[in-house]
Image (cartoon, rainbow, N blue to C red):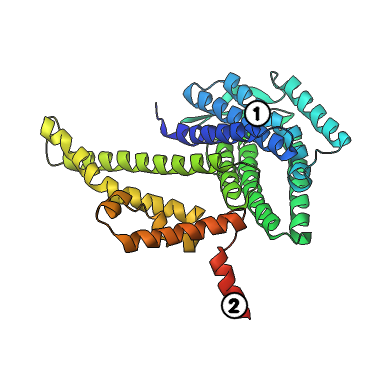
């Protein structure tokens, strides 16, 4: 079995569950926490169903995954109110959304949502939409248009620069989600398609990554530094692991054309190549990740470049230690004055800007 198609939904499942669990752990008092954790759990359910479908194509797994898709209806109905106004939607809106979700759940096991047989497109199987799939698409379109309208209105009227940045990232995620969902609906009705398989799991992966980035950069939700560190080191670990296996496989394929890899010494050559490259490459990956999560003034500090403190102390590099001490004091001062290091310029930079203005 080809495991490559499973990678995107598997990554999306892990990130969705991580975001949902971390968010809900902050409590359910804030509507934004409830809604965003609900999106995470719904995305995880859909992607688990998709993984099972790729493993063993069956309408059972499609219907299981669509439990998450249907659960999005009442969640998306709450989304703009929870995110922009820190309140739940009106009672009438909640009742309409819940009624629609209950209706679709009731017909999900029948042939009204999906045709009884899977269709084959080349090597891929696809569950085709039934008579009421268009109605589901209409309901989702109404919800997404409502969200987009509220977000654009908030972007145009707010004077809060932080809120504008949040809205821009969420709109980006919604646009990508709409394009992927539109593709899947056209595919399930055999109207038009670019890919011969559903790609909405790409949308959930992209939305979760945008959510994580917006959380760390613009404090989209009230999640503490534990989430930031978890995502940061997860990206670093995944990047390093991907590099390790890529280099090892590349060297094995290249060397296999010239030497026999059956002997023990030949089998060690790819590992030796990885050992030589892993240090510099890991540093490069860390720098790339830092470009997303740290402003330029912080990236230039030696404090964030993994200095060897043991060597500096043993070799009595007093001047370099004093430089690190000065940088550390600057960072602490900025943290005391700013909620989010990644969201505004550091204090020293703002002071220099004011000095230029004067």
Q: Which mark is residue 355?
A: 2
User: In which quadrant will I find the C terminus?
Assistant: bottom right
Judged from the image, the secondary structure of the residue bearing numbered disc 2 is: helix
| Quadrant position of residue 322 | bottom left
| Quadrant position of residue 68 | top right
**Would residue 328 be seen by someone viewing this image from the given angle?**
yes
Q: What residue is rendered at 29% in x and 53% in y?
A: 313
In the image, which is nearer the foreground, mark 1 or mark 2? 2
Q: Is residue 325 above or below residue 249?
A: below
Mark 2 crowd level (few <14, some 14–19, many ≥20, 10 Å Cα): few
Q: Position of residue 97 (x, y in %)?
A: 80, 32
* Farthest right residue in view: 92
- Residue highlighted by disc 1: 68
Dots 1 and 2: beta carbons under 8 Å? no
Q: Is residue 217 above or below residue 69?
A: below
Q: Is residue 325 above or below residue 109?
A: below
Q: What residue is rendered at 39% in x and 62% in y?
A: 323
Asked whether, in this view, residue 111 is left or right of residue 335, the answer is: right
Q: CA distance from mark 1 to mark 2?
A: 54 Å
């Amino acid at each position: 079995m080809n495991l490559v198609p499973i990678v995107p939904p598997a990554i999306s499942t892990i990130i969705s569950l991580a975001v949902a669990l971390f968010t809900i752990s902050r409590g359910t008092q804030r509507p934004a926490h409830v809604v965003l954790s609900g999106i995470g759990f719904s995305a995880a359910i859909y992607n688990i169903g998709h993984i099972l479908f790729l493993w063993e194509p069956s309408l059972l797994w499609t219907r299981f995954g669509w439990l998450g898709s249907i659960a999005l209806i009442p969640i998306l109905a709450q989304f703009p109110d929870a995110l922009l106004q820190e309140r739940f939607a009106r009672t009438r809106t909640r009742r309409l959304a819940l009624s629609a979700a209950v209706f679709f759940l009731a017909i999900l096991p029948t042939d009204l949502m999906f045709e009884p047989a899977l269709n084959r497109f080349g090597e891929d199987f696809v569950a085709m939409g039934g008579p009421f799939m268009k109605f589901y698409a209409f309901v989702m379109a109404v919800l997404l248009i409502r969200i987009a309208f509220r977000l654009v209105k908030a972007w145009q009227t707010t004077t809060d620069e932080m809120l504008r940045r949040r809205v821009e990232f969420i709109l980006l995620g919604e646009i990508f989600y709409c394009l992927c969902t539109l593709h899947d609906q056209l595919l399930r009705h055999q109207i038009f398609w670019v890919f011969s398989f559903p790609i909405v799991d790409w949308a959930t992966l992209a939305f979760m990554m945008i959510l994580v980035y917006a959380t760390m950069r613009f404090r989209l939700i009230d999640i503490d530094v534990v989430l930031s560190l978890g995502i940061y080191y997860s990206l670093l670990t995944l990047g390093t692991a991907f590099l390790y296996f890529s280099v090892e496989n590349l060297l094995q394929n290249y060397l296999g054309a010239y030497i026999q890899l059956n002997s023990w010494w030949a089998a060690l050559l790819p590992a030796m190549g990885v050992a030589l490259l892993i240090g510099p490459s890991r540093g490069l990956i860390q720098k790339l990740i830092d470009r997303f999560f740290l402003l330029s003034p912080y990236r230039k500090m030696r404090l964030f470049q993994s200095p060897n403190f043991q060597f500096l102390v043993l070799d009595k590099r007093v001047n370099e230690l004093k430089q690190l001490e000065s940088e550390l004091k600057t960072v602490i001062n900025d943290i005391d004055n700013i909620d989010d290091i990644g969201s505004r310029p550091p204090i020293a930079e703002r002071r220099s800007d004011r000095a230029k203005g004067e």
